[in-house]
Amino acid sequence: MTDTKRFLAFDCGATSGRAVLATFSGRAFDMKEVYRFPSGIIQLGGKYYWDVLTIYQHFCNCLADLGRQGIVPDSIGIDTWGVDFGFVAEDGSLLGNPRAYRDPYTDGIPEKVFQTVPREELYGATGIQIMNFNSIFQLYAQTQEGFAPLKYAQHILFMPDLLSYMLTGKKVCEYTIASTSGMMDQSSRQFNKELLEKLGVRTDVLLPIVQPGEVVGTLRKEIADACGLPQIPVVAVAGHDTASAIAAVPAGDEKFAYLSSGTWSLMGIETPAPIINADSTRLNFTNEGGIDGTTRFLKNITGMWILEQSRKVWEAQGRTYKYADMEAMARSEAGFPSLIDPDDARFAAPANMIEAIDAYLRETGQPVPQNDAQYISCIYHSLAHRYGQVVEMLQGFAPFAIEKLHVIGHRQCDDPGQGRRSGKRPLGHAQDDCEGLCRENLLSRQIKTQKTDTT
Ligand code: LFR
């Protein structure tokens, strides 16, 4: 007999966070978004930060809302974006705020690191694509800067682990999020300390890596009392949002690629083991850890970030568009010919995205948009074009013919995988539901609960 279970998933993105309550009655999840909050990067003194206390406060507000309604979740799980981490001192205090991965402080750092640990050696051990914001490069940059929170930390905790710590007072280092760091050895699935020591990066701040599904602890008594809830368990679910998203793809067989569309577009395949070879090194594909020992072989493509940042510029000028408006605008200018490379470094964190697009188009001799609809058309079609290129690369690695593309996350692109101009074979295209991401956050707990129920 299975009782009804309620799971609360906190899903934190770079621009917003939300809480989804799932009720599981033995057959399926009934999912309901119960809370949403804005989030974002804050710049201070030339550094970029996440305001982790505000995120925590939103979690508490959500729990208090549930408490007032007499809704008691059986467990709580947290997922967030990858790579970023915060600092905890010996006495349990938080040391400042986590640095945000768009902080340009890691520009040029990979090249410095390669002087000690060559690119091939680093990629060969970790299987993680070289992106300047990987945790290893951030830790190296912070060590060089003499960044005080790192200097005085007893432990560093990745974002989902940090938020779990704030709720419970207990520390873990969960596998899927740790795998994004560029510091985890693919063979041992623990941190490669030898490599870090060569770089002079502190290794004593790293906790042993645990697999998803571990109970971190229970809600701190003061939080539970203030919210009118019992001390609910907090579970270390697949803490990396992409791990949660991809695990939820409702695929019939393995012959699919996925596109997880959000601030980033993550495009790849699921494989039983990492793919680390000369081609994956050259094309800079990543091997992130999934649940049940799977690997997500994928590429980060700068995704809706470009549109979100353009939208910010227009909003400041008094023009506000919803996604539905922007889709219609893109269609109205579908013939606009210019394309950008979304992964060009200038689009990572420009002061003004529109100016960055103009500069790219001028430099590449293409027409500059004359109205907002043309910009939107250019962004959507550039993304679709890039998706087409990446699917083709993936086919070169996949030990199967890719027959279908599962798109999860926001409904943001009308012909992913083809690209208007690529002229390539269209893939079957399944538009999956937007709640997919929260499903794995819930799934690992359901599996755990069932195991506990039967023991
Ligand atoms: C997506 C994501 C990507 C990661 C990027 C930065 O939200 O988690 O997987 O590469 O954010 O952390």
Image (cartoon, rainbow, N blue to C red):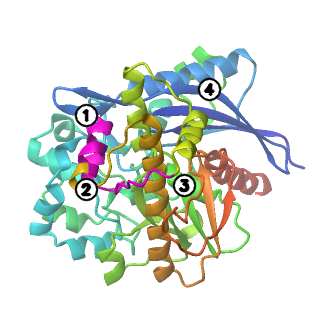
* Lower position in the chain sequence, tag 2 or tag 1: 1
* Lower position in the chain sequence, tag 4 or tag 1: 4
| Closest to the observer, 377 or 174 | 377
Specify the amino acid type for callout 1: Ala
Q: Mark 2 and 4 residues: CB-CB less than 8 Å, in contact? A: no
Residue 422 horizontal/vertical position (percent): 49, 69
Q: CA distance from mark 3 to mark 2?
A: 31 Å
Q: CA distance from mark 2 to mark 4?
A: 46 Å
Front tag of 4 and 1? 1
Residue 192 horizontal/vertical position (percent): 29, 66
Residue 234 horizontal/vertical position (percent): 58, 39
Q: Which residue is mark 4?
A: 35
Q: CA distance from mark 4 to mark 1?
A: 30 Å
Q: Which residue is mark 3?
A: 260
Tell how many labels: 4
Q: Which residue is mark 2?
A: 365
Answer whether residue 200 is visible to the viewer in this image: yes
